């Protein structure tokens, strides 16, 4: 049940720094231009872990995810020490999933060996494209040979590797370019593909270019066709779409992300990280200080993170559940909602979308149809009060 008091929890660790900010990136990340005291930062994360462990005791960790930024830039002992601290504070589930995001050019045999020994068991490689011209447009530092090498080196130890890619960006002036990238991707030695359609955020370089009329993107029909091609090619090669942008071979679905979509408890640690957690019978939204320097200095001095903690109403929870659940192939079980669906959505609009074939409702399950999944974000905005 969505609102049952859960004994399990997931942990997201956000590392805010990267080598270079990508023009499409809207995450809370910053290019690292000066020397950084990694020990000072590591101690801050350890203090945060201790704080949350004392506050939310007797939980079992189901998954840990190191994201960013570029956590793959961290020194070898950094990740391992945080994992040890979490294991000392909480119980780990038998099949705990521990993922770290990697830039392809950070992958080395030494790092892979170190992470493997630290109990990391899933690698997510940020390829973004398998076309060198597109990689230049996206201003990535690596090329496709670097990606192939990263997969080869990682797969010597790790049997759960994911590849991140973006489509419908300025480099996809022809649908065939994306189709050729996909045909390569599904043949690589990976078990999971995260394939995201570009959404331009106004606070990015691409956003600025778009306002000035300097960003040429594929039109709506081309985007829809790329989405259809994505579903067809991945399905034919054994990657089933368990979420709108995520495709996995059976048994390799991302546990961490599924917990987000099932509205399970998770704690976010790091600058700008957010969480959702049940505490004393109520669901809370938690947001940590966004500014990296303020975050690390505050927790180093006060021995606790600087956070905003808001108790969510039943209606707010229902809206959040609706948004995340409709992204999945399983859809939304309306019997598990904390508040009545009618209180959060425009019911005439819901009936309209069902009648028009964008949504289907059967046995109390609401889900997007193949046509509805193409325009899912628009459907959700249309529905919500």
Image (tube, rainbow, N blue to C red):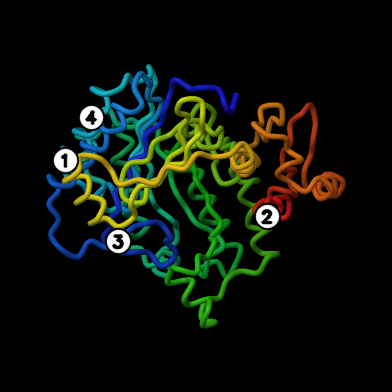
Q: Is 285 or 358 nearer to us in this picture?
A: 285
As measured in the structure, the alpha-carbon distance from the residue carrying label 1 to the one carrying label 2 is: 42 Å
Q: Which mark is residue 118?
A: 4
Residue corresponding to mark 2: 381
Residue corresponding to mark 3: 30
Disc 4, SS: loop
Disc 3, SS: strand
Q: Which mark is residue 229?
A: none
Residue 123 makes an appearance in the image: no
The answer to whether the residues at label 4 and label 3 have Cβ atoms under 8 Å apart is no
The answer to whether the residues at label 1 and label 4 have Cβ atoms under 8 Å apart is no
User: The N terminus is located in which quarter?
Assistant: top right
384 versus 169 height, above or below: above
Q: Earlier along the polypeptide chain: callout 1 or callout 2?
A: 1
Q: Earlier along the polypeptide chain: callout 3 or callout 2?
A: 3
Q: Nearer the viewer, mark 4 or mark 3?
A: 3
As measured in the structure, the alpha-carbon distance from the residue carrying label 4 to the one carrying label 3 is: 27 Å
Q: Is 87 or 77 nearer to us in this picture?
A: 87
Q: Position of residue 173 (x, y in %)?
A: 57, 70
Please give the name of the residue rendered at 31% of the width and 39% of the height, measured from the top-left corner: 154
As measured in the structure, the alpha-carbon distance from the residue carrying label 2 to the one carrying label 4 is: 42 Å
């Amino acid at each position: 049940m969505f609102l049952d008091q859960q004994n399990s929890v997931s942990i997201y660790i956000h590392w805010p720094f990267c080598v270079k900010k990508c023009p499409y990136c809207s995450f809370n990340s910053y290019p690292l231009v000066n020397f950084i005291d990694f020990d000072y930062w590591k101690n801050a994360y350890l203090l945060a872990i201790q704080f949350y462990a004392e506050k939310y005791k007797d939980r079992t960790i189901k998954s840990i995810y190191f994201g960013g930024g570029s956590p793959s830039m961290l020194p070898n002992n950094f990740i391992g020490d945080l994992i040890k601290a979490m294991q000392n504070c909480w119980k780990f589930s038998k099949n705990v999933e521990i993922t770290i995001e990697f830039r392809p050019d950070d992958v080395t045999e030494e790092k892979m060996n170190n992470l493997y020994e630290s109990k990391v068991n899933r690698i997510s490689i940020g390829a973004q494209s398998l076309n060198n011209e597109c990689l230049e447009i996206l201003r990535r530092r690596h090329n496709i040979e670097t990606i192939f090498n990263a997969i080869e080196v990682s797969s010597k130890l790790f049997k759960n590797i994911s590849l991140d890619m973006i489509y419908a960006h300025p480099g996809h002036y022809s649908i065939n370019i994306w189709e050729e990238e996909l045909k390569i991707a599904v043949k690589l030695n990976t078990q999971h593909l995260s394939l995201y359609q570009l959404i331009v955020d106004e606070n990015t370089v691409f956003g600025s270019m778009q306002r000035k009329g300097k960003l040429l993107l594929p039109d709506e029909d081309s985007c829809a066709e790329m989405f259809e091609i994505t579903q067809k090619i991945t399905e034919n090669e054994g990657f089933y779409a368990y979420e709108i942008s995520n495709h996995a071979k059976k048994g390799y679905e991302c546990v961490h992300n599924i917990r987000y979509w099932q509205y399970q408890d998770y704690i976010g640690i790091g600058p700008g990280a957010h969480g959702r957690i049940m505490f004393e019978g109520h669901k809370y939204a938690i947001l940590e200080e966004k500014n990296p320097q303020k975050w690390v200095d505050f927790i180093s001095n006060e021995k606790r993170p600087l956070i905003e903690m808001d108790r969510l109403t039943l209606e707010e929870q229902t809206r959040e559940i609706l948004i995340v659940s409709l992204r999945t192939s399983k859809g939304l079980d309306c019997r598990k909602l904390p508040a009545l669906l009618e209180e959060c959505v425009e019911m005439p609009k819901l009936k309209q979308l069902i009648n028009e074939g964008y949504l289907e409702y059967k046995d109390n399950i609401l889900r997007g149809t193949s046509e509805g999944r193409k325009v899912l974000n628009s459907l959700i905005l249309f529905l919500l009060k």
